[in-house]
Image (cartoon, rainbow, N blue to C red):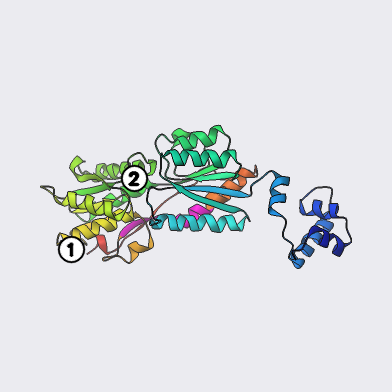
Amino acid sequence: MPVTIRDLASKLNLSITQVSRALGGYSDVSESTREKVIQTAREMGYEPSYAARQLRRKRADAIGYILPTSSPRFSDPFYANFLTGLCDEAAEHQIDLVVSSCAPESEAEEAMYQRWFQSTRVDGMVVNRVRSQDWRIQYLAENQMPFVSLGIPESYGEIPGVKVNERGGFERLVLHLKDKAHKRIAFINGPTELVVIQERFAGYRQGLSRAGLEYENELVVEGNLNQDGGYHAATRLLQNVNPPTAILACNDQSALGAMRAVKEAGIKIGAHFSIAGYDGIREAEYSDPPLTTLYQPTYEIARQLIAMLVKLINHQPISMPHPIIEPELILRASTEA
């Protein structure tokens, strides 16, 4: 039989009301009594009724995350790290993480956000892969639902979240390739409505400018952030009359697909034909050859977002509401001799 408040009250020789208010954190209970109640509750294995706690506090004790993906299968390593970080930090705060997935900009996505808000299913939301015109940001802000975001432009205002200096990172990558004597550096882009993709593309162009290289439209091909898209994008690039000698992909998945296309064309990947990506996924380290990449600490970022959101929900101040993280350039054999 589960331990009840009545059992605790009997053990401590206190009233049920005293025990309940001690566990609820009410100020009319002395600190010594509160500590004694909490210690006894732990020793006896007492767990409060989830439904009763929600009703009393008018809180769901849950944070929501809706994965913005059209893929029928969970295949992006970025999300594996991101979700693990969200789960671990939520568990640290003893709150639930409610996760679902919907195709971006779909009616199903809009309906799910509305349902979670209107049913008070969650106390706050985590958002990522923000779009140029993102109805999710507007909806959550208008309805005063606490939320945080990974990557958000200044045009959206003072929204708490974590930003990675993707623009500066890609600029460094281009300059690294220029140092390897590359003059025709191609770029495999992603969905251009995504703010992170816009930042990475801007970094690519800034890098070309700093390196004294001309921007050429024929050296930019859009992919879809997965290996299949990277493969087809690289195939198109290699068919140019004057093909590139280096390919910079907007993420590691695209870069891995590009590596396959280049190998099939009989080209050795390394110093003379280089490929680099972004994310720092584990697969990049074990590719053949190992992939040069910009590493972003996805797991740690996810934990930081949950910690910020918990403070927002509890109306606590956030010391750094807009931290900026510098991605780490990891040089490997895909751009080396």
Q: Nearer the viewer, residue 228 or 151?
A: 228
Q: Which residue corresponds to the image point at 57% horizontal and 51% vertical from the top-left?
A: 307
In the displayed structure, does residue 275 sit left or right of residue 55?
A: left
Specify the label residue 268 is tagged with. Answer: 1
Q: Is residue 254 visible?
A: yes
- Helix, strand or loop at disc 2? helix
Q: In this view, which residue lies farthest toward the left? A: 241
Element at badge 1? loop
Residue appearing at x 71%, y 46% in the figure:
55
- In magenta, the rendered stretch is 292-303
The amino acid type, in three-letter code, at marker 1 is Lys
Q: Is residue 151 left or right of residue 305?
A: left
Label 2 sits on residue: 200
The percent position of residue 250, horizontal first and vertical second, equals 31, 49
Counting other residues with Cα less than 10 Å from the Cα at mark 1, is it few (<14), some (14-19), or many (20 or more)?
Answer: some
Quarter holding the C terminus? bottom left
Q: Residue furthest front?
A: 1
For the residue pair 264 and 114, the one nearer the viewer reads as: 114
Instruction: Give the x, y percent position of residue 175.
Output: 27, 50
Depth check: 298 or 332 in front? 298
* 215 falls in the magenta region: no
Q: Tell me residue 162's x, y (percent).
A: 48, 46
* Residue lying at 77% horizontally and 67% vertically, measured from the top left: 44
Q: CA distance from mark 1 to mark 2?
A: 26 Å
